[in-house]
Image (cartoon, rainbow, N blue to C red):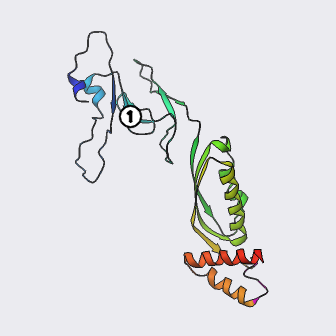
Amino acid sequence: TEVFDAMATPSGVRRIGLAHGGVQGFGSDPDASPPIDANRSDKAGLSYLALGDWHGTKRAGPRAWYAGTPEPDRFRNNESGAVLLVEEGREEEPKPIVTQSFAWEMHSVAAERDADTNELMADVVSSDWPAHRRLLQIVIKGRLPIAERRALQAIRDDLVARTAFLDWRDDGLDIALSADVALGDHADPVIAETAKRLAHEDDSDAKAALLLLDDLLRAS
């Protein structure tokens, strides 16, 4: 965009620049020069510099903006899914106009041992967007009894069936064995003792084994 600086501008003409690239350096070299000078609008006397590359709405410099993409294309909070209405010659900042037809949502859920599963997921399940136009990334961490974990999985299955896409991550969710969990209070002392030992192991294999044991008992 350096060429903009030397372009002659006829009297009474306002110029708008159009370019694609970054206004800040990336990578391991802190001294690397960005492709586009953030002050290009001032240096070149531009009324406005319209930029592409950053897939979100972002002010890049004086009278310079990234408009983003009309539809989001990934899970990222970068104000995508809009276009900018620019009123040339006015000092007001551009106005974003929402154009997206699909919502890409990221949810982080912290589960406590005695949490009510429905309350825990209330914000995730409720939305102004139609379910078939929602793409969800849900990260769940914490500790829940098996019964509540099963209820959580039922909600997951429902979301899979109703939404456009679901990225469900519950690797950080541990199992809490309490007195009201059938496995921990099973009539068979061998099953009860096995369940207690597995529940206190901080290991993904033990967690999987405990869930498998629960599955087998439910199926028997």
Residue in view at x 47 percent, y 42 percent: 78
* Residue 41, quarter of the rendered image: top left
**Residue 39 coordinates in the image, percent (x, y):** 29, 32
**Residue 182 coordinates in the image, percent (x, y):** 76, 78
**Mark 1 residue crowding within 10 angstroms, few (<14) / some (14–19) / many (20+):** some
Asked if residue 19 lies left or right of residue 102, the reply is left
Q: Is residue 137 magenta?
A: no
Q: Which residue is under mark 1?
A: 52
Looking at the image, the residue that sits furthest to the left is 6
Residue in view at x 28 percent, y 22 percent: 45
**Residue 22 coordinates in the image, percent (x, y):** 33, 39
Looking at the image, the residue that sits furthest to the front is 220
Residue in view at x 68 percent, y 83 percent: 195
Asked if residue 136 lies left or right of residue 37, the reply is right
**Residue 91 coordinates in the image, percent (x, y):** 41, 22
Q: Is residue 185 magenta?
A: yes
Looking at the image, the residue that sits furthest to the bottom is 189
Observer able to see residue 145: yes
Looking at the rendered structure, the number of numbered marks drawn on it comes to 1
Q: Quadrant of the N terminus?
A: top left
- Amino acid type shown at disc 1: Gly
Asked if residue 97 lies left or right of residue 27, the reply is right
* Residue 92, quarter of the rendered image: top left
Q: Quadrant of the C terminus?
A: bottom right
- The magenta segment: 182-188
